[in-house]
């Protein structure tokens, strides 16, 4: 079952970023001019790309690397390999890390909780190295875990050379891959997202400098709750930002913006805010089906039940150009006939949503309940009926 669910998450994310997404097929509203080398805006709730530029171009990662480091630390926490109150040693290597720092040293034993704040809020390379060594044993082994995880998530354009993001040959990613990572980070570890919304942090006994989160949008827009900034001379100024706003009939709608290679710290914030505001106003969200609501209940053959409920465990929401909600049409594409057995969560087909015959998005549909195989007599009878049919 875990394998089935993991595959479905990958399918859903592929749908987000595949060329069949709205921005590539429909007459989408034109995004504002964005002063960055590459950018991407994703409606996470609807699983749709709203705007994109050069999303497969290889780029320097800078401290956006720490999104993957965080993903692996959260995974280790969930697996109880470490815990938040566990104190980790600070190696000389961690202490001497250049760039942004938390200002920890080898005399300290620092709780994982504080190291996470040091890595996320302060973007501390020393905190990041301490976490990498604590989870992976060595930085080199942790980097291997990073690359393995990138492969598992389908981040085909990403390669890691270090856990903190300092410039190094071959340490590259793409806007597409960053959207996959950021989306999975939010979906897989919602209990840890509060770290990314923290505005101020300083570890007791360390200097007060570098205590403010560099994500300016946290201070400008109350709907923004993450995620990570990055900057090196090679990467320029980068920001992966996310916001959630409430809308009638839909609930919380989350957008994700990725702006890479902006000209300044202020510019990356301004361009990200521009994208988010445009996404919320140029598109409206429409809930087609509630979580767990059957999209269809087709007949199933050779099973103990005669029908199969298909839908999504989460609500099915689509983003459409503002004012076109009444023009949505849907089509289900699935195998026919459906022959048992079906496991709960097994992929069954696809729901296609369109406006004016223009495809918006394809949503994978799954079995909401399992259907076991019928007895030999039942299967034989249905085989005969299918033959006559």
Image (spheres, rainbow, N blue to C red):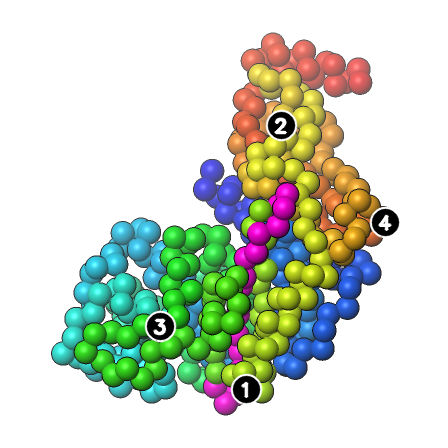
- Locate residue 287: give its quadrant: top right
Distance between the Cα atoms at labels 2 and 4?
28 Å
Is 320 one of the magenta-colored residues? no
In magenta, the rendered stretch is 232-250
Q: Secondary structure at mark 4?
A: loop
Closer mark to the observer between disc 4 and disc 3: 3
Instruction: Considering the whole magenta stretch, tell me its main secondary structure.
Output: strand
Q: Secondary structure at mark 1?
A: loop
Measured Cα–Cα span from mark 1 to mark 2: 52 Å
Residue 296: mark: none
In this rendering, would 169 be left or right of 77? right
The residue carrying pointer 1 sits among few (fewer than 14), some (14 to 19) or many (20 or more) residues within 10 Å by Cα, namely: few
Name the residue beneath numbered marker 1.
264
Spot occupied by residue 142 in the image (x, y as percentages of width and height): 34, 68
Taking 195 as reference, is 22 left or right?
right
User: Disc 2 or 4, which lies upstream in sequence?
Assistant: 2
- Tell me how far mark 3 sits from mark 2, CA to CA: 48 Å
**Would residue 162 appear left or right of 187 to someone viewing this image?**
left
- Secondary structure, mark 3, is loop
Q: Which residue is mark 2?
A: 309
Name which residue lies at 40% across and 75% down: 213
Residue to which mark 3 is pinned: 200
Q: Position of residue 194 (x, y in %)?
A: 39, 60
Q: Residue at x 62, y 12 (%)?
A: 378
């Amino acid at each position: 079952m875990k394998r089935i669910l993991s595959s479905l998450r990958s399918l859903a994310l592929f749908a987000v970023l595949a060329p069949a997404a709205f921005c590539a097929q429909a007459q989408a509203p034109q995004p504002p001019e964005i002063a960055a080398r590459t950018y991407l805006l994703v409606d996470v709730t609807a699983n749709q790309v709203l705007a994109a530029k050069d999303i497969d171009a290889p780029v320097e990662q800078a401290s956006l690397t720490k999104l993957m480091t965080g993903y692996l630390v959260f995974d280790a926490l969930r697996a109880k390999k470490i815990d938040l109150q566990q104190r980790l040693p600070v190696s000389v290597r961690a202490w001497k890390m250049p760039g942004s720092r938390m200002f920890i040293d080898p005399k300290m034993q620092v709780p994982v909780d504080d190291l996470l704040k040091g890595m996320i809020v302060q973007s501390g390379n020393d905190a990041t190295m301490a976490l990498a060594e604590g989870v992976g044993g060595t930085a080199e082994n942790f980097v291997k875990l990073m690359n393995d995880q990138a492969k598992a998530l389908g981040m085909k354009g990403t390669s890691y050379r270090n856990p903190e993001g300092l410039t190094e040959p071959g340490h590259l990613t793409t806007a597409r891959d960053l959207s996959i990572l950021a989306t999975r980070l939010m979906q897989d570890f919602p209990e840890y997202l509060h770290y990314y919304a923290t505005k101020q942090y300083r570890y007791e006994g360390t200097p007060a400098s570098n205590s403010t989160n560099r994500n300016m949008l946290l201070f400008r827009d109350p709907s923004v709750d993450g995620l990570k900034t990055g900057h090196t001379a090679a990467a320029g100024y980068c920001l992966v930002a996310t916001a959630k706003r409430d809308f009638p009939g839909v609930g919380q709608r989350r957008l994700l913006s990725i702006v890479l290679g902006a000209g300044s710290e202020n510019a990356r914030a301004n361009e990200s805010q521009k994208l988010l505001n445009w996404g919320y106003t140029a598109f409206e969200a429409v809930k087609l089906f509630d979580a767990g609501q059957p999209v269809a209940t087709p007949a199933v053959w050779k099973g103990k039940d005669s029908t199969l409920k298909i839908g999504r465990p989460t609500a099915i929401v689509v983003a459409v150009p503002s004012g076109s909600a009444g023009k949505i049409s849907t089509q289900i594409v699935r195998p026919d006939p459906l022959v048992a057995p079906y496991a709960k969560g097994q992929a069954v087909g696809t729901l296609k949503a369109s406006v004016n015959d223009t495809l918006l998005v394809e949503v994978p549909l799954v079995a909401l309940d399992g259907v076991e195989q019928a007895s030999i007599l039942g299967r034989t009878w249905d085989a005969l009926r299918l033959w006559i049919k």
